[in-house]
Every structure is written in structure tokens, then in C-alpha cells.
Image: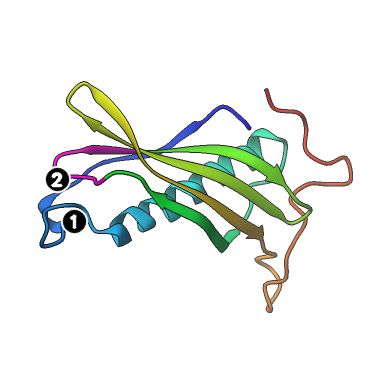
Amino acid sequence: MSVPYLAQQVVMMPRDSNPQGTIFGGVILSIIDMGAHTGAKHHVIQAGGEPPMLVTVAVNRVEFKHPVFVGDVVRCLVSLCKFGRTSVTVKVVIEAERGIENIAVTEAEVVFVNIDRTSPDRKPKALFGPEGPRSVA
């Protein structure tokens, strides 16, 4: 697993909450998808790939561990799990900063596929040339 990349940080507002006063799971899922995309793109570029055109293929194993509240600063930390030929899988940890505490509130694994933006049918495209990804510390 790679060093986590801070892909997104946002303050949760009243518009993000449900009638129980916690943040909607769908809001957190949206943060996961956007942050995972940003982090996956970052990891591909760091490993020597061209800036990819990534599309979400799967959001696996989402686990909501703790509620998120209005006023929490939510950060999306993205770590590389693996590269495939045309795909990249990342682990996402959502942390809530609440006062002096940082609480891991949600985790997920997200899979993206690189597509050929010049192809009319948007076929999958290799992330790297024949040499593959370079090692990233």
C-alpha cells in the first residue's frame, strides 16, 4: 500500500445532513468517488503514466464505521492498492476532524479503468507503456 494522498477536504454543512442530524451516506459516497478519482490519477502520474481518463468501474466494500456530523472537516485519503494493465485500484479512508480528534469514519476500495478518449466507443487503454509503472516509494 502506498503513502496516503490527501485528495479532498471539505467542511460538512447543514445541507449535507439527513433528518437524524448526521451526514447522508450518499454525500460521503460522492466524496469517496471524487476523491478516489483524484487520488488514482495522482498515483498513475507519479508512477510515470500519462494523465489518464479514468471512469469508475466498482466501489467495493464500503464500510461506514462512525457517523459524520455537520461541522466536521472531512478528508479523503487515497492509497494505491494495485495497477492492472488498464485499471487502477485504490483504498479510500474518510477521516472526520472533530475538534482535536481525527476519526476514521468510512473506508472503501474503488476501481477505475483508463479509457481512450479518442475512441468513439471509449475502449479501455493501457495506463503505462511496455515498461510498466515505475516504482513509487
At 78% from the left and 32% from the top, the residue drawn is 134
Query: Could you say which is closer to the camera, residue 96 or residue 84?
Result: 96
Query: Dot 2: within a 10 Å radius of its alpha carbon, few (fewer than 14), some, or many (20 or more) residues?
Result: some
Q: Is residue 133 above or below residue 111?
A: above
Q: Is residue 107 left or right of residue 136?
A: left
**Which residue is at the far front?**
65
Q: What residue would you read off at disc 1?
A: 16
**Percent position of residue 119, x then y:** 71, 72
Q: Is residue 78 left or right of residue 43?
A: left
Q: Is residue 63 magenta?
A: no
In the rendered image, which quarter contains the N terminus? top right
Amino acid type, label 2: Val
**Percent position of residue 79, x then y:** 56, 36
Q: How is the image coloured?
A: rainbow
Q: Is residue 74 magenta?
A: yes
At 69% from the left and 68% from the top, the residue drawn is 118
Q: What residue would you read off at disc 2?
A: 70
Amino acid type, label 1: Asp
Q: Is residue 97 above or below residue 58?
A: above
Count every numbered label the image shows and give the total.
2
At 69% from the left and 55% from the top, the residue drawn is 87
Secondary structure beneath label 1? helix
Magenta stretch, main secondary structure class: loop
**Which residue is at the far right?**
130
At 24% from the left and 59% from the top, the residue drawn is 24
Secondary structure beneath label 2? loop
* Magenta part of the chain: 67-75
Whether tag 2 and tag 1 are in contact, CB under 8 A, the answer is yes
